[in-house]
């Protein structure tokens, strides 16, 4: 029964992967959302963290990494990147591995927001652009200690407050990530992520 359940989960995941890669298009950088890189350790490792994904930032970098973790964790960040006072970045993430026993995995909830205030010379206008993203991550295990998979479901919203007649303008959309992590040995692993797939 357990083996059958794992095969069904693997088949469903493969089907979702095929649908997402085959029929969804449009990256966040092309209109849904800017791909920011939260987490000091992952950012220091560059793209290599996709193949490790072993801390609370796994939900953002490679959701498959959630399933290999043993302890829950929470992180938050508030910063002004590059020292630009008109630009702020806020990030929250809570990872709960080992909570979804039927797929031998767990889930995570994340929130990301960055706000930019635009000013013009002369008649000063205070325009605020604030993209936000809400993420539900689900991860499971195909082969214990070897192969993990994960999916992010993202809801993105963009609000712009202007000093013109339009007032506040709001837009929204949905996107998704699909990730796989394969551990070759205790020292080597590989990761693959397709990010920001959108209809």
Image: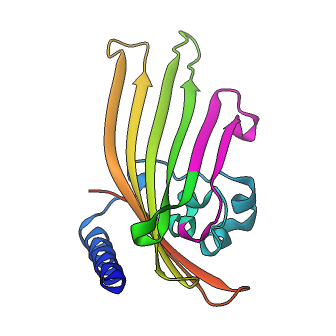
In this figure, which colouring scheme has been used for the structure? rainbow
Q: Is residue 152 visible?
A: yes
What x and y, as percent, mark residue 197?
Answer: 36, 61
Residue lying at 32% horizontally and 16% vertically, measured from the top left: 166
**123 falls in the magenta region:** no
Q: Is residue 194 visible?
A: no
Q: Nearer the viewer, residue 73 or 26?
A: 73
Residue lying at 52% horizontally and 42% vertically, measured from the top left: 111
What x and y, as percent, mark residue 153?
Answer: 38, 54
* Corner quadrant of residue 160: top left
Q: Nearer the viewer, residue 155 or 116?
A: 155
* Corner quadrant of residue 5: bottom left
Q: Which residues are magenta?
A: 67-94
* Corner quadrant of residue 25: bottom left
Q: Nearer the viewer, residue 51 or 26?
A: 51
Residue lying at 45% horizontally and 48% vertically, measured from the top left: 135
**41 is higher (above) or lower (below) than 33:** below
**3 is higher (above) or lower (below) than 75:** below
**77 falls in the magenta region:** yes
Residue lying at 53% horizontally and 9% vertically, measured from the top left: 123
């Amino acid at each position: 029964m357990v083996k059958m359940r794992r095969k069904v989960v693997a088949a469903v995941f493969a089907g979702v992967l095929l649908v997402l890669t085959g029929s969804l298009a449009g990256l966040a950088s092309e209109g849904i959302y800017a791909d920011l890189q939260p987490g000091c350790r992952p950012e220091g490792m560059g793209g290599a963290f996709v193949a490790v994904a072993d801390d609370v930032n796994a939900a953002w970098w490679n959701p498959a990494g959630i399933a290999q973790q043993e302890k829950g964790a929470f992180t938050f960040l508030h910063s002004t990147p590059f020292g630009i006072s008109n630009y702020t970045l806020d990030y929250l993430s809570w990872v709960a591995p080992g909570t979804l026993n039927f797929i031998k995995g767990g889930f995570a909830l994340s929130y990301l927001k960055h706000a930019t205030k635009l000013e013009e010379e002369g008649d000063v206008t205070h325009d605020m652009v604030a993209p936000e993203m809400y993420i539900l991550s689900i991860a499971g295990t195909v082969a214990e200690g070897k192969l993990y998979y994960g999916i992010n479901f993202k809801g993105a919203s963009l609000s712009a407050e202007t000093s013109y007649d339009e007032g506040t303008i709001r837009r929204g959309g949905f996107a998704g990530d699909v990730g796989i992590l394969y551990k070759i040995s205790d020292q080597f692993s590989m990761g693959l992520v397709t990010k920001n797939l959108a209809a």
